[in-house]
Image: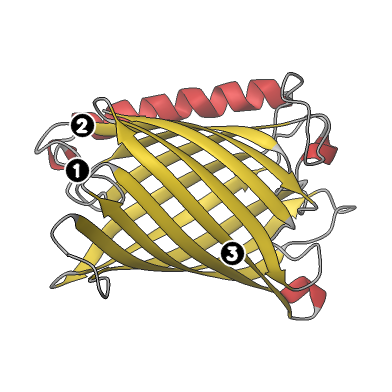
Amino acid sequence: MDARGAVAAIAAHFATATMALAADESAVAPAAAPDAKPPASGWHGRVELKRQNTSRGTDEESTKTTLRLESFFTGPVSLLRLDLQFPDENTGFSGSPLDPRPGDTQLRLGFKPLRSGPYSLPSFVELTLPTADPESLGAGKVQLSAGLRLLAPVTLPLADPKPHETRFEAELQHTQSVAGDEARNDIRYTKLELTLNDTWRRSYTFKFKLKTSVDWERGGDTGAVGEIEGGVNFAEQWRTWLMLGRRLWGPAGIGGTYDDRLEFGLSRSF
């Protein structure tokens, strides 16, 4: 099966799994979806399209367009996510948006979060498949990763808390290659993300993120990037955003890092 056939098969399996979970009576309320405010009952999902122009990233951190499909549930599994990536043939910062190629495919399962008062601890596992065509546009490796998140409400100093909904997020994720092209570099890094996420008047969103990474395949070298994002919730269940990112320290090539990034996104929740 070629890369396009693999992507189509994965998309079909995703749709089948989504319908199966949606039919389960234990998966009708989306209260376990920590990243969204879904309706009180019924199936909840989201479609997202984002464009990333990236300079000097790793093989999986290049200029690309990503289509993300998400379903949220209650029960043991709270999230099912499929990322279909389409890197540009020209992987430099300027890219070639009218000449996309099939990229690696990512699948994520999120699990019902542990809760303690206002604090929430969701967890997830993720699988990355080397479906890029040509293979040089992907990592060339099957990757497994696992992560744990902490979500906690905070109050901004010197700000009226009434129009603000502010949250601190921490995410720890380890990624490791387990199979694939033996000629390509192995992947093994641990990433810690710290995020301050604020929504003002339920319409305007602001996000400040620090992403640090330890690359074990490079002898424990570390690197970090900083990101600033602003967005707006418009119309009914629509959101758009613009993000700017830049390397803060560390050499090029560390897993999960890049030099510069400009991202534009659009999402629709259901």
Q: Residue 68 bears which disc, if any?
A: none
**Label 1: element kind:** loop
Q: Quadrant of the C terminus?
A: top left
Residue found at the far left of this picture: 40
Residue type beneath disc 3: Gly
Q: Residue at x 82, y 29 (%)?
A: 89
Circle 2 packing at 10 Å, graded few (<14), some (14-19), many (20+), is: many
Q: Is 203 placed left or right of 108 in the picture?
A: left
Circle 1 packing at 10 Å, graded few (<14), some (14-19), many (20+), is: many
Residue hosting label 3: 226
Which badge, 3 or 2, comes first in the chain's sequence?
2
Q: Is 72 placed left or right of 182 in the picture?
A: left
Q: Residue at x 38, y 36 (%)?
A: 70
Residues at marks 2 and 1 touching, judged by CB atoms closer than 8 Å: yes
Residue found at the far bottom of this picture: 220
Residue type beneath disc 2: Trp
* Foreground of the two, 163 or 184: 163
- List x then y, in percent, for residue 7: 61, 27
Residue hosting label 2: 43
Q: Residue 30 bears which disc, if any?
A: 1
Which quarter of the figure has residue 250? bottom right
- List x then y, in percent, for residue 175: 61, 63
Q: Is residue 199 above or below residue 148?
A: above
Query: Would residue 34 be seen by someone viewing this image from the given angle?
Result: no
Residue type beneath disc 1: Pro
Q: CA distance from mark 2 to mark 1?
A: 7 Å
Q: Residue at x 83, y 32 (%)?
A: 90
